[in-house]
Amino acid sequence: MIRTVNITLKKEESKTLDAQEEFVAIQDSSNTEEIPDSFQSLEMQEKNLSEQKEHLKALLNQLENKAKEEIEKRKRKVDRLNSDVSNLKQRCEKIAKWLNLEPTLGRSEADP
């Protein structure tokens, strides 16, 4: 059990040392030339990601609007079909009445 703890501590110490070495490397005068390049690279990444985010937000907005339009179109179609079905049922009932037949709309033959 003690060995496991020691190994864990050594790994954590190693991570801390790596971070410290990185910090020292940045402070080292021989690496100061890399700092502007690193900063510029990060700025470019930030700009690209921001542009990508805006593009995706715009695309999402377009897709949501298209989906809403499609939903409205389908609702109108269903409403029209409901109206057509209702009108056809009424016409069938009128003709069946005129012919003195009992309307059988909406019932199956098994229904009494």
Image (cartoon, rainbow, N blue to C red):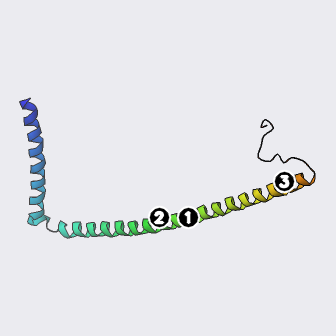
Mark 3 and mark 1: span between their CA atoms? 37 Å
Q: Earlier in the sequence, mark 1 or mark 2?
A: 2
> 41 or 8, which is in the foreground?
8
> 37 or 60, which is in the foreground?
60
- Residue type, numbered disc 2: Leu
Name the residue rendered at 76%, 46% in the picture: 106
Mark 1 and mark 2: span between their CA atoms? 12 Å
- Residue type, numbered disc 3: Glu
* Quarter of the rendering occupied by the N terminus: top left
Q: Which residue is mark 2?
A: 60
Total numbered badges shown on the rendered structure: 3
Image location of residue 97, percent across then percent down: 89, 53
Q: Which residue is mark 3?
A: 93
Closer to us: mark 3 or mark 1?
A: 3
Judged from the image, the secondary structure of the residue bearing numbered disc 3 is: helix
Q: Of the numbered discs in the image, which one, if any, rests on residue 68? A: 1
The answer to which image quadrant residue 94 occupies is: bottom right
